[in-house]
Image (tube, grey):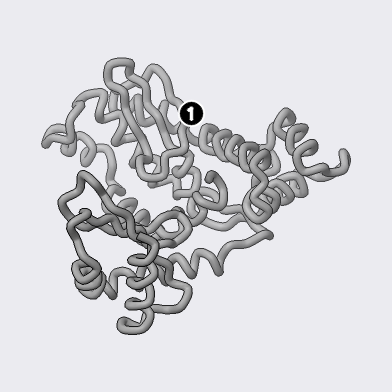
Amino acid sequence: MGDISFELTEFLRSSLYFPQEFALKVVDAKKSKRLTMSFNTQGILIMKKPKSYSIGHCATFLRLHTQELLDIHWRFQKAIQDYSADKLFAFGKWQDFSVFEECLEEGLKKKILRACMLPKDSSSTSYLQELWIQATFANSKPCKRLLSSFYQSLLDSYVKNRIKEISEQMQLFPKEVCYGKSRLTFGSCYTQTKRVRLSLMLALMPHACIDSTIIHELAHLAHGAHNRDFWNLVAHFDKNLRDTRAWRKAHSAQTDYLYYRIFE
């Protein structure tokens, strides 16, 4: 399988003039009857193919999707270039560490102090920046866990008030809100227990995207399936649905790459 990946990568670079840094991995999908492609969080193209598909089938498929693949690749490259050690990415934009000083709880400060081996008299801004560097540049697992905790508290500080407001508007009330790290599923609603689960990915997105996800999941408390009644209810309360979908599509490479650096 490694040989197929290598041959197809060389085909892209030599025949279709893909850049040298473009990476491709081919895997056999035992149960799949069609060929699919997706980029992972590091910008590597993962091609899943049925066992019966030859390298020729794969090459034809790649040729047909050349422009789409290049567009996504360049968006990943831009996300890599934009990555900063001097700012923190939250709620859809790069922001100064000082913006989040008050969000850093004392308990988390003490854990950061030990994990990052900082002087006790360090400022809150220094705590956050050092945590950011250790977690996302040095790839320290303990620091990544602490950074995930910080993002959860950041997201929760917005959600706990906003979900009350939206619940009152929709007259749909969850019994519990919890958090996970799913990259592809931003929210889930467990209708039997009335529990809503939100992904920490939302902390990387604008408030409007978070609101859209909350509305979507609360609507499931009234309609379990994605039927016409469900979408009518969502459309009634979410006036930014089209814009939030457009933002997610335009920034998918950036948020995927940030997910890899922060949470994986």
Inspect this view and state whether residue 83 appears: yes
Residue 200 lies, with reference to residue 46, above or below; the image says above
Estimate how packed mark 1 is, as few (under 14), some (14 to 19) or many (20 or more) residues with alpha carbons within 10 Å. few
> In the displayed structure, does residue 136 sit left or right of residue 126?
left
Q: Residue at x 43, y 25 (%)?
A: 177
In the current view of this chain or complex, which residue is farthest to the left?
A: 228
> In the displayed structure, does residue 78 sit left or right of residue 100?
left
Front position in the image: 1 or 48: 1
Q: Residue at x 62, y 62 (%)?
A: 84
Name the image quarter holding residue 162. top left
Q: Residue at x 44, y 62 (%)?
A: 43
| Residue 32 image offset from top left, x and y in percent | 20, 48
Name the image quarter holding residue 70. bottom left
Total marks drawn?
A: 1
Residue 110 lies, with reference to residue 90, above or below; the image says above
**Which residue is labeled 1 in the image?**
160
| Residue 209 image offset from top left, x and y in percent | 38, 46
| Residue 73 image offset from top left, x and y in percent | 40, 69
* Secondary element at tag 1: helix
| Residue 29 image offset from top left, x and y in percent | 26, 49
* The N terminus lies in quadrant: bottom left
Give the residue type at disc 1: Lys
> In the displayed structure, does residue 31 sit left or right of residue 135?
left
Q: Residue at x 28, y 16 (%)?
A: 192
